[in-house]
């Protein structure tokens, strides 16, 4: 039990590493949270720093989600609940990082990494849907929200453990809460499109 708790804490600390913030500091000497959308994530990294850094941030954010689940798997011996809790901790760390004043991102890339390591095929399908929507609309927020909304259905109908299903429900709630301002802009028709740079 003690080791399981430690693994969850490690997952949170791992998730708290803000690669977007670090990229801003290393490449331009800025706090990326004071630029663009103010979000410490891959999309804002794209706006402020460009494609290369954004791809690296996206991959690293996904990796930390997958790594947290992997730590939970290794320590618990494959207990789905501990894996889910470690993944959730990593996403919480990304959103509210202890190292950076609890001001982080929206957790989508970390969610993808955690869910892909738990249920690769459903996450892949949801990811393809999100990519198609983003390609057609240029709205990253809409694609992100659809990804988290579709995942619970895919997990349920593919017979994955209920721990993973309820995890995906919680992640969808996380995503919609973190994207509430984006949802308002989508409804109003003035959401920022992919490729748009903000001062």
Image (cartoon, helix red, strand yellow):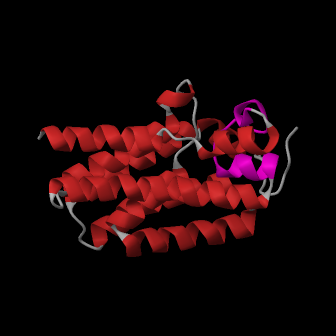
Residue 46 falls within the magenta-colored stretch: yes
Q: Is residue 131 visible?
A: yes
Whether 84 is drawn above or below 127: the answer is above
Q: Quadrant of the N terminus?
A: top left
Residue 57 location in percent, x, y? 63, 54
Task: Give the vertical position of 111 relative to 99 (above or below).
Answer: below
The answer to whether one can see residue 139 in this image is no
Question: Magenta stretch: residue 106 in it?
Answer: no
Give the magenta part as a residue range.
31-49
Residue 162 rendering spot, x and y as whole percentages: 21, 58
Left/right of residue 182 with respect to residue 93 in the rendered view? right
Residue 50's image quarter? Answer: bottom right
Classify residue 133 as left or right of residue 165. right
Side of 85 where 2 appears, left or right = left
* Quadrant including the C terminus: top right
Does residue 176 sit above or below 116 in this rendering?
A: above
Q: Residue at x 49, y 68 (%)?
A: 126
Q: Examine the rendered structure and indicate whether residue 159 appears above or below residue 110.
A: below
Report the front residue among 22 and 130: 22
Q: How far across and down, in percent of the image, does residue 193 sit? A: 78, 54
In this rendering, position of residue 125 left or right of residue 180:
left
Residue at far left of view: 1
Q: Residue at x 36, y 60 (%)?
A: 152
The residue positioned 56% from the left and 42% from the top of the image is 106
């Amino acid at each position: 039990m003690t080791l399981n708790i430690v693994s969850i804490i490690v997952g949170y600390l791992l998730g708290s590493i803000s690669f977007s913030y670090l990229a801003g500091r290393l490449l331009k000497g800025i706090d990326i949270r004071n630029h663009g959308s103010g979000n410490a994530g891959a999309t804002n990294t794209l706006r402020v720093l460009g494609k290369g850094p954004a791809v690296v941030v996206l991959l690293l954010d996904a990796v930390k989600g997958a790594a947290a689940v992997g730590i939970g798997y290794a320590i618990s011996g494959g207990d789905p609940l501990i894996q889910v809790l470690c993944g959730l901790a990593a996403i919480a760390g990304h959103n509210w990082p202890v190292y950076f004043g609890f001001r982080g991102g929206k957790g989508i890339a970390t969610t993808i990494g955690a869910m892909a390591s738990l249920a690769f095929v459903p996450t892949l399908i949801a990811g393809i849907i999100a990519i198609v929507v983003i390609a057609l609309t240029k709205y990253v927020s809409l694609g992100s929200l659809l990804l988290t909304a579709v995942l619970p259905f895919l997990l349920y109908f593919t017979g994955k453990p209920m721990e993973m299903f309820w995890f995906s429900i919680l992640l969808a709630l996380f995503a919609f809460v973190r994207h509430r301002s984006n949802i308002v802009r989508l409804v109003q028709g003035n959401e920022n499109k992919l490729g748009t740079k903000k001062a």
